[in-house]
Amino acid sequence: MSGRPSLRARPGAPHARILGVGGYRPARVVPNAEILTAIDSTDEWIRERSGITARRRAAADESVVDMCVAAAEKALAQAGTTADEIGCVVVATVTHLLQTPSAAALVAHRIGATGAAAFDISAACAGFCHGLALASDMVRGGSARQVLVVGCEKLSDMIDPTDRGTAFLFGDGAGAAVVGPADTPGIGPVVWGADGSQADAITQDAPWSALRDGGTDHFPTLSMNGQQVFRWAVFAMAPVCERALDAAGVGIDELDAFIPHQANLRIVEAMAKKLGLPGDVPIARDVVDTGNTSAASIPLAMERMLAEGQAPHGGTALLIGFGAGLSYAAQVVTLP
Ligand code: UT7
């Protein structure tokens, strides 16, 4: 008997940071005018209630995996890395319409990340921030040296074009980030949680099995109690932002950007006001012409703020994702 073997641990990196970000916006722009008749609405109502003027819609033959690949390739290029360096691919999505295999496994294969682990996570609009938290822990824990996190949705597949509460709100797109080792902390502690007692607030209106069992007369679509989600987002999410700032040891006046989930411009602005965000901190407003792209909205907004010079490379940004579950995740990051 040689006794119980002692297990070897794999050392991780001292810290993790975002090395690069990339976004993919489908070519088709759908202005408010195109959807008004189906929901008996007006351009003024949509702008006033949500700030949205247009959203992007993927082509019929363009899949979640296609959009993930396009965003991932840009993020890899900005990070100055290659797919063979990626040890894990995480895709946050609720609109990959295959129960199995995961979108991540297909994405990893398509980009050539052949040695990578790959899996999907379901945390709706909070999915990207969940993925970022996992990636940071993987890099620091030694399970992967670099991690590709993609948030992607083809919500046009899951919305009822005649539903007044959702048809104008949601769009399609993908955003990706490469997370890798760093000498100093670049991804602050995550503050996250879920409240399943409010699960009905945003939900698929029928399970897939209802299609088989005759329990629904239509392909399941998203249904949302907009007012309930709005109230929760404005009142419960500002304190989550404050806890993420505290956990990272960053003052609100030290931020170079506020990049919340692009749910609705009114929510974004109400949250900034409740937080007491100084007026000179740039706020992501990508929702205006991109719509609410759920898991894709934060990396898409981040990429745009960097590309348009609204936020500095290397600057400090507060991120918060929130949505179905109801689930949320927030962290302070150093921008790539
Ligand atoms: O990303 C995941 C998380 N999701 C969100 O964060 C979404 C949160 N919720 C929202 O963004 C907002 O609730 C919406 C933008 C979806 C809706 O705005 P609202 O100010 O909450 O509108 P409402 O549902 O309270 O409706 C107000 C009025 C109603 O009429 P009355 O009863 O005041 O006469 C509705 O019938 O607006 C009417 N209405 C519409 N009118 C024109 C509702 N939908 C529409 C519409 N067009 N599409």
Image (cartoon, grey):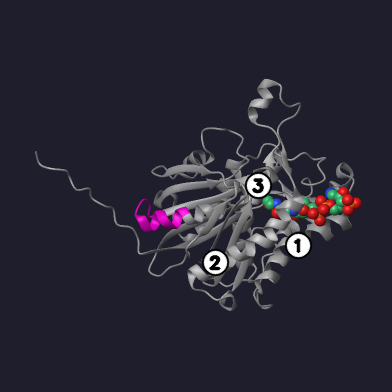
- Residue extending farthest to the front is 197
**Is the shortest distance between ligand 1 and the CB of mark 1 under 8 Å?**
yes
In-front residue for pair 51/165: 165
Q: Position of residue 12 (x, y in %)?
A: 33, 58
Q: Amino acid at mark 2?
A: Arg
Q: Are marks 2 and 3 in contact (CB under 8 Å)?
A: no
How far is disc 2 from disc 1 in space, using C-alphas?
22 Å
Q: Quadrant of residue 66?
A: top right
Residue 255 lies left or right of residue 34; in this view the side is: left
Q: Residue furthest top?
A: 213
Quadrant (top left, top right, bottom left, bottom right) of the N terminus: top left
Disc 2 crowd rating (10 Å Cα; few below 14, some 14-19, many 20+) is: some
Q: Which mark is residue 198?
A: 3
In this rendering, the count of numbered labels is 3
Up-down relation of residue 116 to residue 299 (above or below): above
Mark drawn on residue 266: 1
Q: Secondary structure at mark 1?
A: helix
Three-letter amino acid code of the residue under disc 1: Arg
Magenta range:
134-145
Q: Earlier in the sequence, mark 3 or mark 1?
A: 3
Q: Viewer-nearest of labels 2 and 1?
A: 2
Marks 2 and 3 sit apart, C-alpha to C-alpha, by 22 Å
- Identity of the amino acid at label 3? Gln
Which residue carries the number 2 mark?
243
* Place of residue 74 in the rendered image (x, y in percent of width and height, measured from the top left): 55, 55
